[in-house]
Image (cartoon, rainbow, N blue to C red):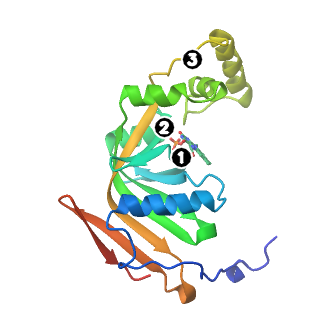
Amino acid sequence: MIDDITSLRQEYTRHQLSKATVALDPFEQFTKWFEEASSAGIVEPNAMHLGTSTVDGSPSGRVVLLKGFDEGGFTFFTNYRSRKAGELIQNPRCYLHFFWGELERQVFIRGTAAKTSDEESDAYFAQRPYASQIGAWASEQSSVVASREVLEKRFEELSAKYGEGAVPRPEFWGGFRVTPSEFEFWQGRPSRLHDRICYAKTGSVWATSRLSP
Ligand SMILES: Cc1cc2nc3c(=O)[nH]c(=O)nc-3n(C[C@H](O)[C@H](O)[C@H](O)COP(=O)(O)O)c2cc1C
């Protein structure tokens, strides 16, 4: 039991960030930080918070796994009938957020999401472990299920149906790619004077600015 939550604090001293040293291209900067997060022993450095909202602005959020990124955007996979997918289809504006505490860093990305091609979703689904493939079929993600037993029974039935053969991708399951319009790279610094470098796109050019912490 924590007696005094107000005393929980950390002084950030490990790294720094400046407009002079960041990459001109935010994807290059993200690649550098992602590689550093991957080598720092962080559990699932590709876990990112995805924020969505309904068309009338009611927000929701959850963690998903980044499965690829390049200049075209940041890709994750999910159930197309889930809450997040429903919101993204109605309102593609969303954000991604990474927190890499061991490196005293966060990255915020604002962008718009669009479904990946069927070919891309097929290719990723095919390389998932068998149990995850069956799990995708078994879960009506985000809707109420009567009990854990119902879910497990559905999993057993689907395992029996597909046996050891190839499992096709459900048409209700696939990827989204988030195309960024803004990035913020945040580096914790002493005395709460953190470094915040933002990138915003004008035409095809990314411009950087420093924000107050
Ligand atoms: C570490 C971690 C990784 C996850 N990865 C995914 C993922 O890649 N895709 C996914 O649909 N859900 C993933 N989830 C589950 C989601 O956080 C969420 O519970 C689920 O997608 C339903 O969200 P929704 O009802 O808002 O659509 C993950 C959860 C955690 C904690």
Marks 2 and 3, Cα distance to the nearest angstrom? 17 Å
Question: Which residue is drawn at the image coordinates 54% and 46% (left, top)?
Answer: 65
Q: Are marks 2 and 1 in contact (CB under 8 Å)?
A: yes
Under 8 Å from ligand 1: the CB of mark 2?
A: yes
Question: What amino acid type should be assigned to the residue bearing mark 3?
Answer: Val
Tag count in the figure? 3
Question: What amino acid type should be assigned to the residue bearing mark 1?
Answer: Val
Query: Looking at this view, is 185 or 94 the one in front?
Result: 185
The quarter in which the C terminus is drawn is bottom left
Marks 3 and 1, Cα distance to the nearest angstrom? 22 Å
Residue 118 vs 20, above or below: the answer is above
Sequence-wise, the earlier of marks 2 and 3 is 2
Question: Which residue is drawn at the image coordinates 53% and 50% (left, top)?
Answer: 62
* Disc assigned to residue 77: 2
The residue at which mark 1 appears reads as 64
Q: Position of residue 34 (x, y in %)?
A: 51, 58
Question: Which residue is drawn at the image coordinates 64% and 59% (left, top)?
Answer: 42
- Mark 1 burial class by Cα count in 10 Å: few <14, some 14-19, many 20+: some
The residue at which mark 3 appears reads as 167
Q: Is residue 25 left or right of residue 37?
A: left
Instruction: Give the image quarter of residue 8.
Output: bottom right
Marks 2 and 1, Cα distance to the nearest angstrom? 8 Å
Disc 1 is placed on an element classified as strand
Under 8 Å from ligand 1: the CB of mark 1?
A: yes
Q: Is residue 59 left or right of residue 4?
A: left
* Disc assigned to residue 104: none
Query: Looking at this view, is 190 or 94 the one in front?
Result: 190
Question: What amino acid type should be assigned to the residue bearing mark 2?
Answer: Phe
Under 8 Å from ligand 1: the CB of mark 3?
A: no
Residue at the outermost left position? 203
Query: Looking at this view, is 16 or 201 the one in front?
Result: 16
